[in-house]
Image (cartoon, rainbow, N blue to C red):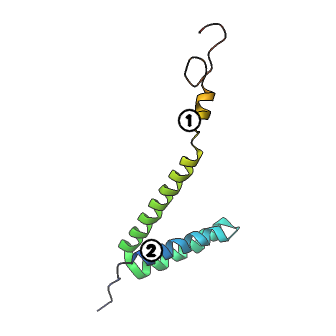
Amino acid sequence: MEDEPQSPSEREIRASMYEAVRAILADSDKDQGRQTARAVIDRFAAEHAEAGVMRLLEVMFAENITLYARIAAHQQPSADSTAQDRGANGDARPAPDGDEP
């Protein structure tokens, strides 16, 4: 009887995720980095089957969304700069000359 693949632990998922990301970032040739990352994911699939890979991808996706949210939060203009950018008519575009108070 074949051994059933075991569900990955959170630690195994994170370790593989970071290994894949490091592989992509470490190589100046992005195609080679992606191939190396793919090998990491393929090895993970061999150890943990499809459900394990789906869990790995789910965690990677969630981390990616969190990262983008953090970046977006740091790029939001402050309330002071937004108020300074507003025109005399109170909206984001300046009032036309002489047409509006």
Q: Quadrant of the C terminus?
A: top right
**Residue 96 percent across, percent down from the top left:** 64, 13
Q: Residue at x 44, y 60 (%)?
A: 62
**Residue 47 percent across, percent down from the top left:** 42, 82
Instruction: Give the Cα distance between marks 2 and 1.
Output: 40 Å
From the image, tell me which residue sits under label 1.
Answer: 79
Between residue 48 and residue 82, name the one nearer to us: 82
Between residue 63 and residue 37, name the one nearer to us: 63
Identify the element where label 1 is drawn: helix
Dot 2 amino acid type: Ile
Q: Quadrant of the N terminus?
A: bottom left
In the image, farthest residue toward the bottom: 1
Q: Which mark identifies residue 13?
A: 2
Dot 1 amino acid type: Ala
Q: Residue at x 54, y 47 (%)?
A: 73
Q: Residues within 10 Å of mark 1 (few under 14, many from 20)?
A: few
Q: Residues within 10 Å of mark 2 (few under 14, many from 20)?
A: many
Which image quadrant is residue 98 in? top right
Earlier along the polypeptide chain: callout 2 or callout 1? 2
Identify the element where label 2 is drawn: helix
Q: Residue at x 59, y 45 (%)?
A: 75
Q: Residue at x 63, y 20 (%)?
A: 94
In front of the other: label 2 or label 1? 1
19 up-or-down from 30: above or below: below
**Residue 85 percent across, percent down from the top left:** 63, 28
Between residue 25 and residue 34, name the one nearer to us: 25
